Image: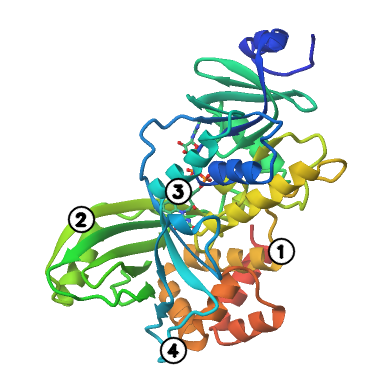
Amino acid sequence: MTFLIKSPLIFKLSVQNSSHLSLFNYTIVGAGASGLWLADSMLNKGLLKENTLCIIENDTNKVNDRTWCYWAKSPIGYQDIISKEWNLIKNLYRKNNPEIFPYKYYHVKSHDFYEHIKNRLKENPNVFWKNDSVIDVNQIAEKKIIIRSGQESWVSNYVFLSSLPTSSKTAEQQKLTHYLGKQVEEESLFLWQSFVGYRIKTSKPFFNPLEMIMMDFNTPQSKFTQFFYELPFSENEALVEFTRFGTQILDYDYAIKQIEDRLKAKNIAYEILEIEKGAIPMSPKFDHLKNYLPESQNIIYIGALAGALKPTTGYGFKRMYHYAEKLAQALKQKGNSPLPTMKRKWRFRLYDILLLQILNDTPYLGKSIFEALFKNQPITRILKFLDEDTTIFEEILIFSRLSIVPFLKSLFRYCFIK
Ligand SMILES: Cc1cc2nc3c(=O)[nH]c(=O)nc-3n(C[C@H](O)[C@H](O)[C@H](O)COP(=O)(O)OP(=O)(O)OC[C@H]3O[C@@H](n4cnc5c(N)ncnc54)[C@H](O)[C@@H]3O)c2cc1C
């Protein structure tokens, strides 16, 4: 068998021998949020009755590496994995009912998510697990892709990538850029949402476990955009998280100091149960520009790489679930129908870019923008807006109450300055 490929020698050798390689109909690279949501959707839609799935993950210690929060009208996926839910979000800037009906704010521990989905998949004999790192993924013909990991190679009809193969960073990034429908990588606009949180236990009841705090800017800004989240799990236990939107990742010691100052100011005696920290990319560079994939595209990017994270919030868990459902459904129905991407409506992409530019160029304006938002809008409308579900009329209501000058300047920059 011969195929035309432009790959390194080692890869040509494996291609020539590809008839001896094992075949899986689907391969998912990365057993994180998007990979497992997709595998689960494939299982639920019956795709794994007659097709085989290989899931490859390189992290041997992937146990409880993060928690996911999201708001929704009902839990996505499984109620069993919800560790806490809140009906109330305290709005510090507007005295009104904190009820967020029809939404609830949900909290999922990654350990519970990984375990739950993996246990479901384990019951299916068509699912195969590999613990290894993917080095190369190359499409050599329609529905024929060779995957090379540290230990072996195999063939798949479709590959879903939630992480880039490790062989060549530049080449893999170029493939992704091309996949997203772009000529060149959108480099310029890239911020981090970085955070450090203390999960604490207090000696006396202190928190209202029904009500979480979303963006509390009552902390020195030091010319940044930074705020607190407070997620109370009981009267005595809460996650108090310091977060910054900015070009630099938050300094750990600085963040700890802000958390401790806050707890001291509130006169809370506590012990630390856990420390959580992380950084989420905030960038439009992962946004897909096309609605559907070309018929011949059998390497499909998923998760953060393919635009699942909303650039101005970093939320993406819910979006990955919905995309997995759509993708699995499309794969099931696949005749001539093209596969969907995660393309967002252009106007929401524009809003995100305008705000990110403001946060990038003038981060000290972040506090006043977000405070105006929370002061003038019901939280449910803000949540709907962040879900990109609002109508243009609702968006006019939102923008009409914000200071317009920074947004006009940002629009000018977007239109005329590269
Ligand atoms: C600390 C943290 C907290 C977050 N909290 C929230 C939240 O509350 N709500 C929300 O909506 N979003 C949140 N996010 C954002 C987003 O939902 C998560 O980052 C999510 O896990 C991204 O899913 P993913 O599938 O794209 O990537 P991941 O979940 O990171 O999965 C990618 C997987 O690929 C594996 N891998 C990497 N390279 C290779 C390779 N070469 N071969 C094989 N496997 C490989 C990795 O080990 C990993 O398991 C958070 C992100 C972080 C970092």
User: On screen, 351 above or below 326?
Assistant: below
User: Where is residue 108 drawn, in percent x and y?
Assistant: 42, 56
Q: Looking at the picture, which amino acid does disc 3 mark?
A: Phe
Using a 10 Å C-alpha cutoff, classify the residue at mark 2 as few (fewer than 14 neighbours), some (14 to 19) or many (20 or more).
few
The front one of 271 and 388 is 271
Distance from Cα at disc 3 to Cα at disc 4: 32 Å
The front one of 236 and 14 is 236
Q: Residue at x 71, y 40 (%)?
A: 178
Left or right side of 201 for 334: right
Distance from Cα at disc 4 to Cα at disc 1: 33 Å
User: Where is residue 9 drawn, in percent x and y?
Assistant: 64, 10
Q: Which residue is mark 2?
A: 273
SS class, disc 2: strand
SS class, disc 3: helix
SS class, disc 1: helix
User: Where is residue 288 drawn, in percent x and y?
Assistant: 69, 51
Q: Looking at the picture, which amino acid does disc 1 mark?
A: Trp
User: On screen, 123 above or below 19?
Assistant: below
The reply to whether the C-beta atoms of the residues labelled 2 and 1 are less than 8 Å apart is no
Quadrant of residue 83 in the image? bottom left
SS class, disc 4: loop
The front one of 140 and 18 is 18
Q: Which residue is mark 1?
A: 346
User: Which of the two labelled residues, at mark 1 and mark 3, occupies the earlier sequence position?
Assistant: 3
Q: Quadrant of the N terminus?
A: top right
Q: Does the beta carbon of the residue at mark 4 sit less than 8 Å from ligand 1?
A: no
Q: Residue at x 70, y 83 (%)?
A: 393
The disc at residue 113 is 3
Q: Which residue is mark 4?
A: 97
Q: Does the beta carbon of the residue at mark 1 sit less than 8 Å from ligand 1?
A: no
Q: Quadrant of the C terminus?
A: bottom right
Left or right side of 106 for 136: right
